[in-house]
Image: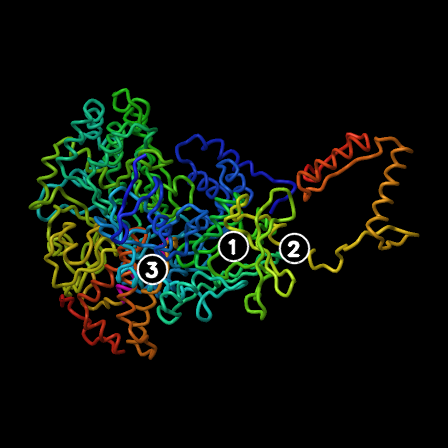
Amino acid sequence: MSESKMNLDGQDVTFQEGETVLEVARRLGTFVPTLCWDERLEPFGSCRLCVVEVEGHRMPASSCTLGAAEGMVVRTGSDKLRKMQSTLVEMVLSENPGDECPRCRDLGSCEVHDLATEFKVGRNRFLGATSNASMDDSNPFLLRDYDRCISCYRCVRICDEVEADHAITMTGRGWNKGIATAFDGLLMGSDCTLCGQCIYTCPTGALADKKMVNQGSVPGEIEVTRSVCPYCGTGCSINLHSRDGKMIGVTPVLGGPVNAGALCVKGQFGFDFVNSDDRLTRPLIRKQGKLTPVSWNEALDYTASRLKSIKADHGPKAFYAIASGRAPGESAYMLQKFTRAVMNSNQIDNCSRG
Amino acid sequence: MKTGIEVKDPVTDGILDRLMEQPAPFLEVLHAIQDHHGYLPEPALRQVAERFKIPISDLYGTVTFYHYFQLEPKPIPDIRICENSACCLHDLDAISREVVDVDLGVAHSGQVEKISCPGRCDMPVPILIGEKFFHGARAGAVENMTAATMPLPPETGLEECLFRDIRDGIDTLAGALSHGAWESPKLAASDPQEVLAQMNESGLTGRGGAGFPTGVKWEAVRSETRGPKYIICNADESEVGCFKDRLLMAHSPHAMLEGMACAGLVTGAKIGIVYLRWEYPEILESLQVAIDEATQAGLLGDDVCGTGRPFRIVIRRGAGAYICGEETSLLNSLEGKHPFPREKPPFPTTHGLFDLPTVVNNVETFCAVPAILEKGGAWFQALGLGENAGTRVFSVSGDISHPGNYEVPVGTSLRELLQTYAGGTPDGKAIQGVTMAGISGGFVGAADLDVALDPGSLTELGAMLGAGGIIVHDETRCMIQAARESMHFLAQESCGKCFPCRIGTVRVTELLDELIEHSAGNPVIRDNPLEELADLEEVLGETSACGLGLAAPFITRTMKKYWPDVVQDYIDGQSAKNPGKGDSVE
């Protein structure tokens, strides 16, 4: 295959068929600001921050929607482009009420804040009407506060393109645009699965993990541990966030080989059991009607004797095994082997089949 | 809400059964439901979503985009009154007060709501109740409403193309046939190359404003191998100050239908769709009659004009959205998608309706085709002045003696159009400036009234010819206010997708409001209004995603060019003693 070449900021660079100019630039470490772009989504071309100058084009082009082409000559960082990008960031800052910017909500990441810092601008110019679109949503996990929304529609698009849930949509038009479920209902009454994907593509604090709100400003270092979600056998990569040995939240790993940044409601939000007081920490046997802590040896001996006597008294058909969906394949194999070879029963099932 | 029992609306099911197999049925289905119920009930929308396989959330969002789809029942309609550039030259507050008590023979709620331009700037001020328009409301005389008039014969005696028989009753099929209508499809079927040659020789370019050569567009679609192809007539004329397509469709519908049929026969498309703006209900009726008559006469349908080739035309109504006049938004609207503009390329010629090769032309463009094919491309070309090809229709409104549409040779001077054709200002006041392209083309001030009306000459002045709408402002008008009204319209009609336009049009409107209030005594004024304005103009004009935002700076840049002293007076907090002459200072 012949190599295709284009010129980026004076350097001849190679590109793959189908790459956009933005992808080429980012791959080479060139700074091109974006707000509506997410590598998992189709290019949308709405924030216009990624504009570049293309030789032969009368006007700057948005690099996220511009396919690289043989012989194309592109400049990314002229003074004129930087000035327009800087103005655009100021315009974005002006759109929402409040202080400096649509500030971070949970762990302290906000793309608008980062760009405001990069371009050394604040919420000083172009001030006028603000979006004033805040809304309560009574669900337990996702905080929705459109006072900080910049209308990049990454949440709508990840819900459509990646999750295929189509729970939320763009409403209205122009300044009176919004993001809503069908007929403006709550998330819990919509097709939302509360997977939390919208939170992790949102470039501001408009969407946040309710459990992690303000965690970025609590003193003490947050430790991030890469792990695998314990819920089902899929094996989604997650980052566990903890402070002082206590879990405070889960975030998806964008480069996770199985999930590529996706998680479901359980993996995303269902970690309360880790620090729960109700959590079992040792085996219990009911003695005289009361659950009593015992040693592992006692528990295993007791279970083995009961299984033997059930089989002896009632036959193998009295035994029915249900494997946990959280167990890995090896454990599930062992359980069916045990059920068939030891208990002589073919009655085996898995909770995921429900 | 997921409920156990879904109550289905049998009316909606019937509508869906009837229309689903029709071309691009989406908008028609919604209108049919709304026509029946008076609004779009939730169960009906859920049925529509299911049949179209559109997520219900997306359908809901799309419906909320349009001005005239209603989600709540409203048995008694409000009074709607146009608030845009040509109409706000009249006392809208007084009209709003008075109209409530005038018996117009239609029940209304007594509530008055301002709406975006419904394309009746020649009959200000239009009032809409339900789906009925009343025209010519004036303060103190709201009941004396008048309807549209036929274009005046040209004082110059110059030959016309589009209007040549328009005063002779060609709105009926019989009238059109007696003037030689419906001859050109035979040529289009037998010798499409000849048609393309004539079109190219004529120099006809897109009259919606973009000015792309029509013959080249048809040739591109003809050469595509994928299909089915579509011919779309963009009748979503929605810019303030533009009402030429309304007149052409009312009085010369067969020229447009014939032009579409030719495009179909040349390119191989079998279906034509007229995307008609919702605000023209009377055209919906008369155009449907014209289509039905032509179909019954065998001029459209399975055997177009005896050629043995099929071509049928359907009307699809918009629902109130200026952006749907942008051709890729229009395509999304027809498909039932959120009507944001698409990224170009690809262009509609290769990836148009349902991603298939599509011709999208303006009403006036199609109307010019039959005459070109009858008299030859060279004839049309020669109608223009100098290097310019052909004629075009201008809509003139505002402070003018005879508001209306005028067909003039391309290259005619603006002054001649305003003075000779349209009779100048009604009371002899001096013209201070006019808007161009409707409003998005900025202003031409008094100093430049001799400019030739061709795209290049206007571009040289820093303005834009566009779709040929011109609103005249006499010497008593405040041009800062005029700029504000233009920008306000764009802000109202911005689709909201791209950041520069969504935020920029609102911010420029606010900045102009601030200047106007400051000149009237409000002490508040930002530190560097002109610097902020220039920065907004730059971002709007260079980074916006479609023509709406890209054109917006024409307005304020020409305002500053022609009325710099007034702008400075306003910044200094003084009301301009002399509103300015519109002399260019560069």
Near-viewer residue (A331 or B177) = A331
Q: Is the magenta stretch mostly helix, strand or loop?
A: helix
Q: Give the range drawn in magenta.
A: B481-495
Q: The residue under label 3 is which amino acid type?
A: Glu
Is B260 above or below relative to B554?
above
- The residue carrying mark 3 is B83
Residue A341 in sight in this render: yes
Is-magenta flag for residue B489? yes
Q: Determine whether, in the image, residue B490 is placed left or right of residue A187.
A: left
Between residues A17 and B216, which one lies in front from this camera angle? A17
CA distance for labels 1 and 3: 43 Å
Query: Where, quadrant-wise, is the C terminus of chain A in this rendering?
Result: top right
Considering depth in this image, is A49 or B522 the residue closer to the camera?
A49
Q: In this view, does A200 lie above or below B586?
A: above
> What amino acid is labelled 1 in the image?
Tyr
Residue A87, quarter of the rendered image: bottom left
Chain ID of residue with mark 2? A
* Crowd band around label 3 with a 10 angstrom C-alpha radius: few (<14), some (14–19), many (20+): many
| Chain letter belonging to callout 3 | B
Q: Which disc, if any, is residue A271?
A: 2
- Where residue B391 sits in the image (x, y, percent)? 14, 43
- Residue B4 position in % (x across, y down): 65, 41
